Image: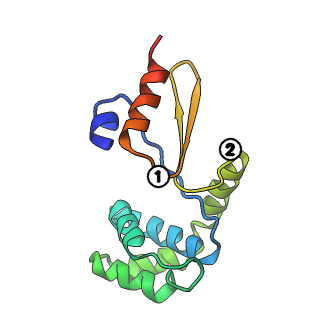
Amino acid sequence: MIQNLVTTGKAKLVWRDFDYYGPDSVSASEAAYAAGEQGKFWQFHDLLFQSQQTPNSGWASKQNMEMFARQLGLNMTQFDQSFNSGRYDSLVNSNHSLGVQAGVSETPTFFLIGPNGKMVTIAGSQPESVFEQAVASLTSG
């Protein structure tokens, strides 16, 4: 989907976290943002999704987030300072509020907005064809 829609210029991807599961979600988002300071946001994001467990079971504990950071070879002093600073609290809260205002009730949720402002919402995991049809409907006529 990224290759066929985003890299071709047919669509632009803007990603925001939506932490509705509570403490584990918040911890995971803050750790991913901290990893992003070292250019490893998407690698950390992917590792989180491969490793996630039952919501709020503690799988996103500080220890596990640090273990993932070490797996990615991050500078641990920098990661720990950023992750433990609370620097991303307002961003995570703001993204959650924006999601609630937009009617997000599940993840992933995608909002596709055409050049004329028309919008299509796609909720849940969907095949690439759904996105291609939505993009086509927004850019035709």
- Report the residue at 47% width, 65% height from top: 33
The residue nearer to you, when weighing 4 against 7, is 4
- Could you say which quadrant of the image residue 46 lies in? bottom left
- Per the image, the residue denoted by label 2 is 102
User: Where is 34 relative to 5, above or below?
Assistant: below
- Per the image, the residue denoted by label 1 is 125
Q: Where is residue 113 in the image (x, y as percent from the top left)?
A: 54, 30
| Category of crowding for the residue at label 1, using alpha-carbon neighbours closer than 10 angstroms: few (below 14), some (14–19), many (at least 20) | few
Q: Is residue 50 left or right of residue 93?
A: left
**Tag 2: amino acid:** Ala
Query: Which image quarter is the N terminus in?
Result: top left
How far is mark 1 from mark 2, CA to CA? 18 Å
Q: In this view, does 68 lie to the left or right of 73?
A: right
Colouring of the image: rainbow
User: Where is 101 relative to 7, above or below?
Assistant: below
Q: Position of residue 44 (x, y in %)?
A: 37, 68
Does the residue at mark 1 contact the one at mark 2 (Cβ under 8 Å)? no
Q: Is residue 71 left or right of residue 21?
A: left
- Could you say which quadrant of the image residue 37 lies in? bottom left
* Secondary element at tag 2: loop
Numbered mark located on residue 71 in the image: none
